[in-house]
Image: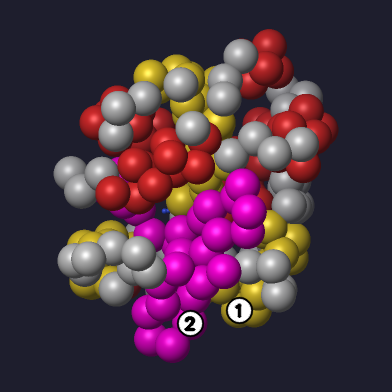
Amino acid sequence: MKVGVLALQGDVREHMRSIEGAGATAVTVKRADQLAGVDALIMPGGESTTIGKLLDRFDLLEPLTTRVENGMPVYGTCAGLILLAREVVGDEDAPFRVPVLDVSVRRNAYGRQVDSFETDLEVSGFEETLHAVFIRAPSIESAGDEVEVLAEYDGAPVMVRQSNILASSFHPEMTDDERIHELFVSMAN
Ligand code: GLN
């Protein structure tokens, strides 16, 4: 099982460590030929505008959309969630996206860098709560019928799944709890 981590910008190394901890092989993906060689892909946190522009510049938008539409598991955290969202609302857009996930998101909805926070979440299917780190996180303002909400914070979804697409507004790769990466690896198996 080879899991790619999109390595254009953002917290790539942390995801590679978590994927290896979850028992799969992690490789970086920067080009279309590398994308073709992975079984699943993580889109890390970072700056969604920057990552989107690089996806466009490296001609990855179309092959990535096609692969996800054909069933490749993808997991987006934070900026990765924004890049997978069908719609971005509010003042800050992220124009280059892979809009496969039927949610509407708002960037930086939980505040600026100083407003980053940590909390314990109930996650559907997990026996114990999960310590979640939010860093300038997007909010999920609405989700379509196909979208299953796996965790909520303050009454709004913060982790969702739509068949082969998993996304969270927080950063599980920032802790050594590997349960979400294990869930993702199991989706790819
Ligand atoms: N604020 C960033 C954005 O809007 C996301 C932050 C993150 O990925 N931690 O793109």
State the mark number for residue 150.
Answer: none
Q: Disc 2 vs disc 1: Cβ atoms closer than 8 Å?
A: yes
Q: Going 36% across and 25% down the picture, which residue do you hit?
A: 24
Q: Residue furthest bottom?
A: 155
The quadrant holding residue 37 is top right
Answer above or below: position of 96 versus 159.
above
Q: Quadrant of residue 85?
A: bottom right
**Which residue is the site of mark 1?**
141
Image position of 30 with respect to 70: above or below: above
Quadrant of residue 124 in the image? bottom left
Task: Tell me which segment is drawn in magenta.
Answer: 148-175
Q: CA distance from mark 2 to mark 1?
A: 7 Å
Can the viewer see residue 35? Answer: yes
Q: Amino acid at mark 2?
A: Ala
What type of secondary structure mainly makes up the magenta span?
A: strand
Mark 2 = which residue? 156
Residue 109: where, in percent of width, then height?
Answer: 49, 74
Q: Nearer the viewer, residue 114 or 84?
A: 84
